[in-house]
């Protein structure tokens, strides 16, 4: 992953040790704050104005901390800024936008996807199976109670993100990409150094779509809307995200690639 200058986290534990991806809270923030909001505006809205409707001051502060762990909440960083912009452009894409961003920042969520993406359509996912999978990825790292909590949290996130269905009984379903969420998935993969065909075959692609053809339809629609530039000829695929990046960020990516 890229360093924090682009909004990624190098922490060994992520927000799912405490909560799911907090989609309802993120939706409330998008509805409450303008696209031009700055970093301090999130603290003011969550803690001072209580736009998340939390019952106590302590719960407001805790919500801010968890949301920051999950997303960064810093519009000066590309990872969060583009999520924030695209979420305002299409609120229906927000669940997948949040999923992609949280995945990029949270090692436990990334570990859980290795299991979720291998499930057959309609297959049931037992919480105990997820607990065992998390233990395999982080042996002797978490207590049984923490593994149970994390399993519940990641399962909730995958449900909001369109990969699982059901409440008590979780079953595998296929996510359906939207032009906005497909753009963001490819963008985040691009930030990590992936290019061309690598992006279409990446875990970031699988976060929002179960098939390449479905993903390409969404990406071509996004390209027609000017969200990105997509060129495909003679088996070569090229992405250009210049419209979403600052000149400084473009320089960082050029140097690192």
Image (cartoon, helix red, strand yellow):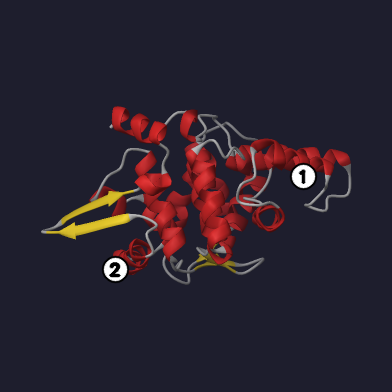
Label 1 and label 2: CA atoms lie apart by 40 Å
* Secondary structure of the residue carrying numbered label 1: helix
Query: Is 14 left or right of 196, judged from the image as shown?
Result: right
Q: Does residue 237 show up?
A: yes
Residue 112: image location, x then y, percent: 50, 48
Specify the farthest residue to the bottom.
122
- Nearer to the camera, 224 or 43: 224
Residue 194 screen position, x and y as percent: 30, 42
Residue at the (37%, 59%) spot, across then down: 226
- Quadrant where the C terminus sits is top left
Up the image or down, 65 lies above or below 222; here it is above
- Residue beneath the point at 54% across and 46% down: 102
Q: Which residue is mark 2?
A: 213
Q: Which residue is mark 1?
A: 46
CA neighbours of label 2 inside 10 A, class few (<14), some (14 to 19), many (20+): few
Residue 235 x, y percent position in the rendering:
14, 57
- Using the rendered view, name the quadrant where residue 64 is placed: top right
Please tell me whether residue 154 is drawn above or below residue 8 in the rendered image: below
Residue found at the far left of this picture: 234
Q: Is residue 2 above or below residue 223?
A: above
The numbered disc on residue 241 is none
- 32 vs 36: above or below: below
Task: Residue at 58% x, 62% y: name it.
Answer: 159
Nearest-to-viewer mark from 1 and 2: 1
Q: Position of residue 160 (x, y in %)?
A: 59, 61
Label 1 crowd (10 A; few <14 / some 14-19 / many >=20): many
* Camera-side residue of 14 and 136: 14
Determine the residue positioned at 51% across, 58% down. Answer: 96
Q: Is residue 158 visible?
A: no
Disc with the residue nearer the chain's start (1 vs 2): 1
Q: In the picture provided, is 37 more to the left or to the right than 82? A: right
């Amino acid at each position: 992953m890229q360093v924090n200058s682009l909004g990624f986290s190098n922490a060994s534990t992520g927000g799912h040790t405490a909560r799911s991806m907090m989609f309802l809270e993120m939706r409330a923030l998008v509805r409450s704050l303008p696209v031009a909001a700055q970093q301090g505006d999130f603290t003011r809205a969550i803690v001072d104005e209580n736009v998340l409707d939390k019952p106590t001051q302590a719960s407001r502060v805790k919500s801010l901390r968890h949301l920051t762990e999950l997303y960064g909440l810093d519009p000066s960083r590309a990872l969060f800024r583009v999520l924030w912009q695209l979420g305002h452009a299409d609120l229906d894409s927000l669940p997948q936008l949040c999923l992609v961003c949280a995945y990029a920042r949270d090692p436990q969520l990334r570990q859980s996807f290795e299991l979720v993406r291998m499930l057959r359509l309609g297959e049931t996912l037992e919480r105990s199976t997820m607990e065992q999978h998390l233990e395999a990825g982080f042996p002797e790292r978490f207590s049984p109670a923490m593994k149970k909590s994390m399993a519940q949290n990641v399962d909730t996130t995958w449900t909001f993100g369109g990969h699982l269905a059901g409440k008590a009984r979780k079953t595998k379903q296929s996510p359906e990409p939207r032009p906005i969420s497909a753009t963001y998935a490819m963008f985040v993969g691009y930030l990590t150094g992936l290019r061309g065909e690598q992006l279409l075959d990446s875990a970031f692609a699988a976060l929002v779509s179960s098939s390449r053809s479905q993903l390409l339809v969404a990406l071509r629609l996004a390209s027609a809307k000017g969200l990105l530039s997509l060129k495909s000829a003679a088996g070569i695929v090229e992405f250009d995200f210049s419209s979403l990046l600052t000149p400084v960020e473009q320089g960082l990516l050029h140097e690192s690639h």
